[in-house]
Image (cartoon, rainbow, N blue to C red):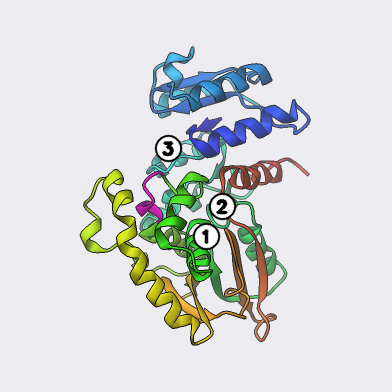
């Protein structure tokens, strides 16, 4: 069951439809804010492709043959049909923690791309995690950090092998990586941001990404893996206070006002052999998300485009951290990460 049908949801539906049953995954239902569509035997490839196209054009599920209902009502209906090994996939950006707990309680496994349920208070986070019991419903959330990269999986494999993770650090925002690397290469800040929006790396209002809020949530998710129970980090906000109250159109129009300052800062760091990167750091006792200057020859400094990089410092990998790097932005990459999580739920 797919909760949400934005860019990532449509990309996931496209992946499944293209597999034409070979993936072993069936989409039995779709939900958006208007209602839901449910077919116990699975939506056909043709139906799924048509719905994907019509949703892209702005239609709501309730107007595409769906039933008007709340997400809670939709879950209750699906649970009553005893669907085999049901999985709820949350690709929204909303506060869905209560709904996810209901789904787990009704026997659904849950797969997340949505970060918000994992970045509430520690008490709410612990409540959600405790809804997963040995032999019972499971919660997977690889796609919340690093898109399709195996970051969460690597953490668990290290721990299961007897290692202890001491620190996780890296670049986990494809959008901010794109902007920082483009500016470091001499391109205007405004041009880099516009390109990120046009290519679908950033939200239509890029301040959602430039604020650092998304990177901060990812940092908190990583820190909580390590046992951190403190507050969320206060990320470095790359949007000047004077531009935070503008409409999206006004902000995009005034972006060139920031070019000179970014160029000067970039040139200043370049003269010292450094480049700007947005780096998150997580330990059992602290978490941060900051724009920092790093050595241009370092692994992080050498990153370009939308690539992500995460370094695990552990008892075994203390002097030379274990590094994972690869594509870190885009609906298709994130959808691939979700599919990996879904397949990992299969028996055996």
Residue stretch in magenta? 204-209
Q: Name the residue under label 1.
A: 178
- In terms of secondary structure, where does tag 3 sit? helix
Magenta stretch holds residue 205: yes
Question: Whole-percent x and y of residue 315?
Answer: 65, 82
Q: Residue 99 carries which label?
A: 3
Q: SS class of the residue under badge 2? A: loop
Cα distance between the residues tagged 3 and 2: 27 Å
Q: Residue furthest top?
A: 65
Q: Which quarter shows the N terminus?
A: top right
Q: Quadrant of the C terminus?
A: top right
- Residue sitting nearer the eye, 157 or 308: 308
Name the residue that disc number 2 marks: 329
Look at 70% across and 46% down and name the residue there: 344
Q: Which element is circle 1 on?
A: helix
Rate crowding at label 1 as few (under 14), some (14 to 19) or many (20 or more) other CA atoms within 10 Å: many
């Amino acid at each position: 069951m797919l909760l949400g049908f934005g860019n990532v949801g449509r990309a996931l539906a496209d992946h499944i439809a293209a597999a034409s049953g070979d993936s072993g995954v069936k989409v039995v239902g779709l939900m958006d804010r208007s209602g839901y569509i449910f077919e116990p035997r699975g939506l056909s490839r043709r139906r799924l492709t048509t719905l994907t196209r019509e949703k892209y054009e702005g239609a709501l599920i309730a107007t595409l043959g769906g039933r008007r209902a709340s997400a809670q009502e939709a879950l209750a209906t699906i649970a009553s049909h005893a669907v085999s090994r049901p999985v709820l996939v949350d690709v929204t950006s909303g506060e869905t923690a209560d709904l996810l707990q209901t789904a787990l309680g009704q026997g659904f496994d849950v797969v997340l791309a949505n970060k918000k349920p994992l970045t509430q208070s520690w008490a709410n986070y612990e409540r959600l995690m405790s809804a997963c019991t040995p032999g019972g419903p499971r919660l997977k959330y690889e796609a919340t950090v690093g898109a399709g990269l195996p970051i969460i999986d690597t953490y668990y494999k290290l721990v299961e092998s007897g290692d202890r993770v001491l620190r996780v650090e890296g670049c986990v925002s494809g959008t901010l990586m794109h902007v920082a690397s483009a500016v470091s290469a001499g391109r205007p800040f405004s041009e880099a941001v516009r390109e990120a929006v046009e290519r679908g790396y950033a939200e239509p209002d890029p301040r959602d990404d430039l604020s650092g809020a998304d990177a901060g949530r990812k940092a908190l998710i990583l820190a909580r893996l390590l046992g951190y129970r403190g507050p969320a980090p206060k990320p470095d906000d790359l949007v000047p206070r004077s531009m935070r109250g503008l409409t999206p159109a006004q902000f995009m129009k005034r972006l060139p006002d920031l070019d000179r300052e970014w160029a000067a800062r970039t040139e200043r760091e370049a003269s010292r052999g450094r480049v700007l990167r947005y780096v998150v750091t997580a330990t059992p006792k602290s978490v941060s998300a900051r724009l920092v200057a790093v050595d241009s020859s370092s692994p992080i400094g050498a990153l370009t485009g939308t690539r992500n990089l995460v370094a695990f410092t552990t008892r075994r990998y203390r002097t030379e951290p274990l590094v994972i790097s690869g594509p870190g932005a885009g609906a298709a990459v994130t959808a691939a990460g979700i599919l990996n999580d879904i397949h990992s739920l299969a028996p055996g």
